[in-house]
């Protein structure tokens, strides 16, 4: 990486972080705009790594800056604060060579129009290099109201959960069994110098020892392998389907779970639904890459009158919109943007989606409800309320491999077995 390219990466990181931290922007949206502006994939990888690390450790970095600076930064200094967080992330979380990180970050301050503060940036980062960043309580990154809910729902596990959510997530792969096998692909990775682990609960899954560029994975472009967290991969294991079964993926984007089901059983008659037509194009691209086909519909799953042909489905997957509290390590800006009123809106939507999914499910069929949430209000309590509304619904416990018992479902907590936080409930509809 040239010195100028290194400066551009730090400038871009500061601008992305400023937008996310101070202007309420989505990290995913900001990176979607910023990444294509960097031609070198190594620069893009570094930008992502800096932004994620700075957001995961922002409370520790802010506390260090508050203790080290004689005067607090003002709102007009937000971009400078973002640059300082990017600098601390390089030295602390990413452990980059200090000389390169310091010189590029200091020069970035000048590029951002703050030459008079470049010396201060240099002094603060050199102090971090000498002393390290003081430890901070991982729970401090969570808004108070959300922290209280986690502690109420998972009192014994809360501290471990907060700590796991502050760590970088491992890279999980799903092997397309129509093209290869998990163990055969693991051997192929080893031949390419990439080490991976198998997990007993995941017949198609591999966890990489170190993250790597996805485009460099053998067979990625041709659909041999996909990136999907282990918890998300387990959703497919909740189904036992006849080959020609009629299946609905009610909130399908970005399409990983539909693709997994079709990789296992290409004969499924699967309908992938999503309310957002743009996100549905992601589903189409996902399925094309792995060589799978499905019926795609841009429609609101909570209103079957707008899209359903009246023929019941043998199985329905409802991977519902949720608070995303189980994937904070992958979406650290969730903790910045989530509000208490969001939870009320989400639980109401989940209930509508559940009732609609039940209406299109055939007697004797299976409904799988899943979220990447840790909150009982979206998970155990949601299912308990659903059962109270539907006498024909019968819970079918998927077993210990899916996590802690929780209201008739199962809850995996963030970091357990290296996986994301995820909730699963499997419901059978009594035969008529």
Image (cartoon, rainbow, N blue to C red):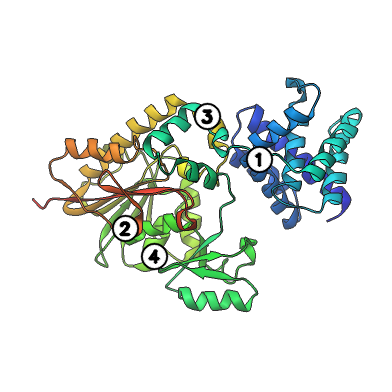
Q: Position of residue 355 (x, y in %)?
A: 24, 38
Which quadrant holds residue 29? top right
Find residue 143 and name its label.
Answer: 3
Say what secondary structure mark 3 lies in.
loop
Task: Judge depth for marks 4 and 2 and give the one in front.
Answer: 2
Relative horizontal placement of residue 246, taking residue 110 as reference (left or right): left
Using the numbered discs, state the Cα–Cα distance from disc 4 to disc 2 in whole angstroms: 10 Å
Marks 3 and 4, how far apart at CA: 33 Å
In-front residue for pair 107/28: 107
Nearer the N terminus, badge 3 or badge 4?
3
| Residue 362 shown left or right of residue 368 in the figure | left
- Single out the mark in the foreground, 1 or 2: 1
Give the label on residue 400, or none: 2
Residue shown at 55%/46% (left/top)?
A: 329
What residue is shown with label 1?
135
Query: Vertical placement of 188 versus 316: above or below?
Result: below
Q: Is residue 3 above or below residue 126?
A: below
Q: CA distance from mark 1 to mark 2?
A: 35 Å
Give the SS element for disc 2. helix
Tell me if label 1 and label 4 are in contact, CB under 8 Å: no
The structure residue drawn at horizontal position 77% and vertical position 36%, both measured from the top left corner, is: 83
Q: Position of residue 426 (x, y in %)?
A: 26, 51
């Amino acid at each position: 990486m040239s010195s100028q390219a290194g400066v551009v990466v730090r400038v871009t990181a500061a601008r992305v972080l400023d937008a996310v931290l101070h202007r309420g922007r989505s990290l995913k949206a900001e990176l979607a705009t910023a990444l294509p502006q960097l031609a070198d994939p190594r620069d893009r990888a570094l930008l992502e790594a800096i932004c994620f690390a700075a957001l995961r450790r922002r409370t520790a970095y802010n506390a260090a800056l508050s203790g080290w600076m004689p005067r607090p930064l003002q709102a007009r200094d937000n971009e400078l604060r973002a640059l300082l967080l990017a600098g601390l992330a390089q030295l602390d979380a990413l452990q980059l060579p200090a000389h390169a990180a310091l010189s590029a970050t200091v020069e970035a301050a000048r590029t951002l129009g703050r030459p008079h503060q470049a010396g201060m940036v240099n002094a603060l980062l050199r102090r971090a290099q000498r002393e390290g960043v003081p430890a901070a309580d991982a729970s401090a990154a969570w808004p108070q109201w959300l922290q209280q809910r986690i502690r109420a729902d998972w009192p014994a596990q809360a501290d471990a959960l907060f700590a796991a959510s502050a760590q970088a997530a491992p890279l999980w792969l799903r092997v397309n069994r129509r093209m290869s096998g998990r163990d055969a692909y693991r051997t192929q990775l080893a031949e390419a110098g990439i080490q991976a682990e198998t997990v007993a609960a995941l017949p198609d899954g591999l966890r990489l020892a170190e993250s790597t560029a996805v485009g460099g994975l053998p067979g990625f472009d041709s659909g041999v392998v996909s990136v999907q967290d282990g918890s998300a991969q387990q959703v497919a294991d909740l189904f036992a389907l006849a080959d020609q079964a009629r299946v609905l993926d009610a909130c399908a984007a970005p399409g990983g779970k539909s693709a997994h089901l079709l990789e296992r059983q290409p004969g499924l008659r699967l309908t992938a639904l999503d309310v957002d037509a743009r996100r549905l194009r992601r589903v189409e691209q996902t399925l094309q890459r792995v060589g799978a086909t499905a019926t795609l519909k841009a429609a609101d799953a909570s209103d079957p009158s707008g899209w359903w042909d009246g023929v019941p489905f043998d199985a329905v997957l409802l991977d519902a919109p949720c608070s995303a509290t189980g994937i904070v390590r992958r979406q650290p800006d969730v903790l910045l943007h989530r509000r208490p009123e969001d939870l009320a809106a989400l639980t109401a939507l989940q209930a509508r989606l559940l009732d609609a999914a039940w209406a299109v499910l055939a007697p004797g069929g299976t409904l799988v409800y899943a979220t990447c949430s840790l909150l009982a209000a979206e998970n155990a309590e949601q299912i308990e309320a659903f059962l109270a509304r539907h006498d024909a619904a019968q819970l079918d416990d998927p077993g210990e491999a899916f996590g802690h018992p929780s209201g008739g479902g199962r809850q995996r907590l963030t970091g357990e077995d290296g996986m994301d936080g995820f909730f699963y409930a499997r419901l059978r509809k009594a035969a008529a």
